Image (spheres, rainbow, N blue to C red):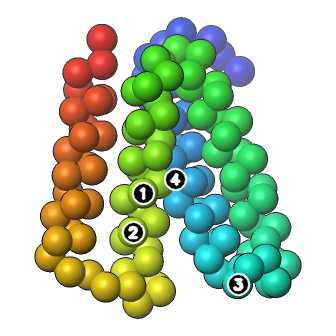
Amino acid sequence: MASLSAAGTAWTLLLIAGLLEILWSASMKASEGFTKHLFTGVTLIAAWLSFWLLGLAMKSLPLGTAYAVWTGIGAVGAAILGMVFFKEPATAARILCIVAIIGGILGLKLLHT
């Protein structure tokens, strides 16, 4: 793999890691307490890949920034999937909080030096 000194590569890895966090959290919910083996397998593989890519991204990005962005992507994606697929409430307050998280993620990305 190419050097992770390029900030763009680290951010790309971090984005993919965050998307995989969304996948493993939704799969965990769909596994119904790890009783559905296909979803359990998806959860474990996606979680491992997500952590691995987060670790690679952290070679170039600060811990606090990388972790906050990773968890933010996962939190926003999981909340949206929860509302769409798991019929969780989509209240105005909840959507406003999701927008606030997105603002924080963008702020961390834009202010990263």
Q: CA distance from mark 1 to mark 3?
A: 19 Å
**Residue 79 — which label?**
2
Q: Would you call the spot at circle 2 few (<14 residues within 10 Å), some (14-19), or many (20 or more)?
A: many
Residue 9 seen: no
Q: Which residue position is annotated with label 4?
A: 19
Q: CA distance from mark 1 to mark 4?
A: 10 Å
Q: Would you call the spot at circle 1 few (<14 residues within 10 Å), some (14-19), or many (20 or more)?
A: some
Residue 61 seen: yes
Mark positioned earlier in the residue sequence (1 or 4): 4
Locate residue 112: give its quadrant: top left
Amino acid on which disc 3 is placed:
Glu
- Are dots 2 and 3 in contact, CB under 8 Å? no
Mark positioned earlier in the residue sequence (4 or 2): 4
Q: Which residue position is annotated with label 3?
A: 32
Q: Would you call the spot at circle 3 few (<14 residues within 10 Å), some (14-19), or many (20 or more)?
A: few
Amino acid on which disc 2 is placed:
Ala
Where residue 103 sits: x, y (%)? 20, 45
Q: Nearer the viewer, residue 5 or 28?
A: 28
Q: CA distance from mark 4 to mark 3?
A: 21 Å
Q: Is residue 63 above or below residue 6?
A: below
Mark positioned earlier in the residue sequence (2 or 3): 3
Where residue 85 sits: x, y (%)? 46, 85
Q: Would you call the spot at circle 4 few (<14 residues within 10 Å), some (14-19), or many (20 or more)?
A: some
Q: Is residue 20 above or below residue 7?
A: below
**Residue 75 — which label?**
1
Pick the quarter of the image with the C terminus.
top left
Mark positioned earlier in the residue sequence (4 or 3): 4
